[in-house]
Image (cartoon, rainbow, N blue to C red):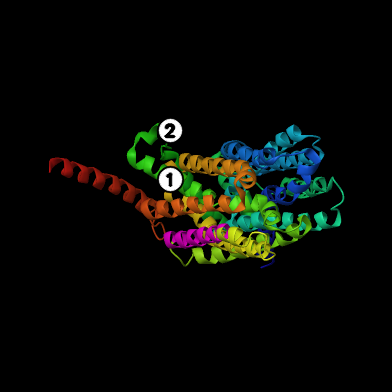
Amino acid sequence: MSEQRNQKSFLTTIIVISTFGGLLFGYDTGVINGALPFMSEALGLNSFTEGVVASSLLFGAALGAVVGGRLSDYNGRRKNILYLAVFFFIGALGCTLAPNVTAMVIFRFLLGLAVGGASVTVPTYLAEISPVESRGRMVTQNELMIVGGQLLAFVCNAVLGNMMSDNIHVWRYMLAIAALPAVFLFVGMIKMPESPRWLFSKGKDEEALAVLRKIRTEEQAQAEFNKIKGTVLNEAKVKQAALQDLAVPWIRRIVFLGIGIAVVQQITGVNSIMYYGTEILKDAGFQTEAALIANIANGLISVIAVCVGIVLLGKVRRRPMLLVGLAGTTTSLLLIGIFSNVLDGSGALPYVVLSLTVTFLAFMQGAVAPVTWLMLAEIFPLRLRGLGMGISVFCLWIANFFIGLTFPVLLENIGLSTTFFFFTAMGLAAIAFVKKFLPETKDRTLEELEFFFRAHHTTRIQKNTSEKVL
């Protein structure tokens, strides 16, 4: 009994330490929200260079997600997380000490490589080291750490921004905090084991079994070892899809759906709020210090909503949940646009905008975001998963990059109201896409989904042939 408690305790330690990668992901993407107003003054940023500084991390993340997955396959999950911790640390210090815009963009890009790498490596490590019966719960701990990291960034921004509002370098302190969890991640991962599944895939059977014995009972370790062995052998027989396979219509359709799901999540404008929430609240009428405090509500609702979303995923069908979430986000954006016009100059406007951004994030983080990642994991058959996920996640980050780059320019040139009307139109397009193209994936195996896509393509060909005959 004591040994079993020690095994559970060690597994918990592995999860806590590795998910600091998610915490850094969240902090580094969220800290710019409060640092930007002070940084703009210190570095002389305009609306375009604000967008460049914010979005350079996102462009790096797009590349990091693609390269990071391959490196973790080559080097191992644990070693890759150690490298990412070094990138997080160097990037955080570089941004903190950046003397000009050029240096800031370079180090933000470096941070982006770490964020993108963490976005694919940490969930993979968790999935491969967790027991099958609790895998879903343990992997979602990383999602909680991401939004928890953003909340931490918003709180630190508010505290430092209000305590040191007269200090022109306050933004440097905000950015410097990210170096601390990077050190913790590196030191902690030194003592963590490698993924047993990765070890087995590299022919290190004894090492894989030794790791399993540290985190499972002997019986569980042997059973899982045999299961991993069977899975790896089966996967070795599967020919992985390559770019030329996109010539096959049903494969092309699944990849198209994956890209669509990824882009749908981003064109809601969620990251305009997560990256520029303080700027939005200032534009609505809050003073900088008050906007920093008010923005904590956005981080707090995100954490609560992710918890609710995790519970709903097991009970609600994917497609209706996504449509309800998109309807909620789009309505919130529309109301921000309307009230920004109707209440322009009113003392009530800042509080109305804050209430609506909180409502927006409740629908986004409670429905749209969890369904997005789950459906991306579900729609791709085994041989297509590497290619499909790689392309989809890359497109997600690129869409995120363009929104991060253009949002401050839109805000300055067309105003708060029109900017949110633009995102409302994007939200309506997202709803139309989901209704027309997206199938339900809940309670369907990967094989059943592959059969569905193949059958759909065959039916369409037969329909077109019969119409030509007629």
| Res 126 visible | no
Residue extent of the magenta highlight: 318-337
- Kindly identify which residue carries mark 2: 243
Residue 205 x, y percent position in the rendering: 57, 43
How packed mark 1 is, by other alpha carbons closer than 10 Å (few <14, some 14-19, many 20 or more), is: some
Which residue is painted at 71% across and 55% down in the image? Answer: 282
> Closer to the camera: disc 1 or disc 2?
2
| Above or below: residue 142 compared with residue 67 | below
Circle 1: element type: helix
The three-letter amino acid code for the residue at tag 1 is Leu
Marker disc for residue 382? 1
Residue 19 x, y percent position in the rendering: 67, 53
How packed mark 2 is, by other alpha carbons closer than 10 Å (few <14, some 14-19, many 20 or more), is: few
Q: Left or right? Give the position of 288 relative to 255.
A: right
| Above or below: residue 262 compared with residue 355 | above
Magenta span has 408? no
Q: In which image quadrant can residue 243 be found? A: top left
Q: Main secondary structure of the magenta part?
A: helix
Q: Left or right? Give the position of 386 relative to 25.
A: left
Residue 290 x, y percent position in the rendering: 76, 60
Which residue is painted at 74% across and 45% down in the image? Answer: 186
Task: Pick whichever of labels 1 and 2 is earlier in the sequence.
Answer: 2
Query: Which quadrant is the N terminus positioned in?
Result: bottom right
Q: Is 276 or 206 nearer to us in this picture? A: 276
